[in-house]
Image: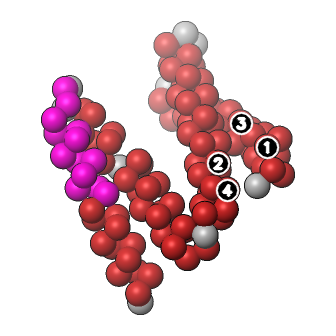
């Protein structure tokens, strides 16, 4: 129960901080971008440090970086499939999911052993 309370408080505080930062920036679309993923990641890492120590949190942060790199490759692939090859949105996202998984698991296999 204490873990959930800690997650709620840490997540709420970090989400609020990023929402305020996003509200100060232009365009307003940054507000949603800044309020979601970074705040959840920071809340998760802060809990990981408290519960498992800094080494565990460092390993978790690397997996987040691998996921972000994979998401960037996925996004580029979707854009190429939509714009250059004129795929439909569903077909492009499903096809590019293979890219996301390949990059994420490739990075994890290549560098995951150092955690």
Q: Do residues under tags 3 and 1 come within 8 Å of each other at their CB atoms?
A: no
**Is residue 16 covered in magenta?**
yes
**Is residue 29 covered in magenta?**
no
**Coordinates of residue 3 in the picture (x, y in percent):** 44, 82
* For residue 55, above or below residue 24: below
Q: Quadrant of residue 87?
A: top right
Q: Which label's residue is closer to the chain start, 3 or 1?
A: 3
**Coordinates of residue 54 in the picture (x, y in percent):** 60, 63
- Which residue occupies 47% across, 30% down? 89
* For residue 92, above or below residue 6: above
Bounds of the magenta segment: 14-26
Q: Do residues under tags 4 and 3 come within 8 Å of each other at their CB atoms?
A: no
Q: Secondary structure at mark 3?
A: helix
Q: Do residues under tags 4 and 2 come within 8 Å of each other at their CB atoms?
A: yes
Spatial CA distance of label 4 from label 3 is 18 Å
Spatial CA distance of label 3 from label 1 is 12 Å
Check disc 1: other Cα within 10 Å, few if <14, some if 14-19, many if 20+.
Answer: few
In this view, the residue in front, 51 or 108, is: 51
Q: Do residues under tags 4 and 1 come within 8 Å of each other at their CB atoms?
A: no
Determine which residue is flagged by label 1: 111
* For residue 58, above or below residue 27: below
Determine which residue is flagged by label 2: 62
Q: Secondary structure at mark 2?
A: helix
Residue 74 visible in the displayed image = no
Image quarter of the N terminus: bottom left
User: Residue 76 vs residue 66: left or right?
Assistant: left
Determine which residue is flagged by label 3: 103
């Amino acid at each position: 129960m204490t873990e959930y309370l800690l997650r709620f408080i840490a997540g709420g505080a970090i989400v609020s901080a990023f929402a305020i930062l996003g509200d100060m920036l232009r365009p307003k679309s940054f507000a949603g971008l800044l309020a979601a993923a970074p705040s959840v990641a920071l809340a998760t890492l802060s809990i990981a440090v408290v519960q498992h120590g800094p080494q565990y949190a460092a390993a978790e942060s690397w997996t987040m970086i691998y996921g972000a790199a994979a998401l960037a490759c996925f996004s580029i692939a979707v854009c190429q499939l939509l714009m250059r090859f004129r795929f439909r949105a569903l077909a492009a996202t499903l096809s590019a999911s293979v890219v996301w998984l390949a990059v994420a698991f490739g990075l994890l296999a290549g560098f995951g052993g150092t955690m």
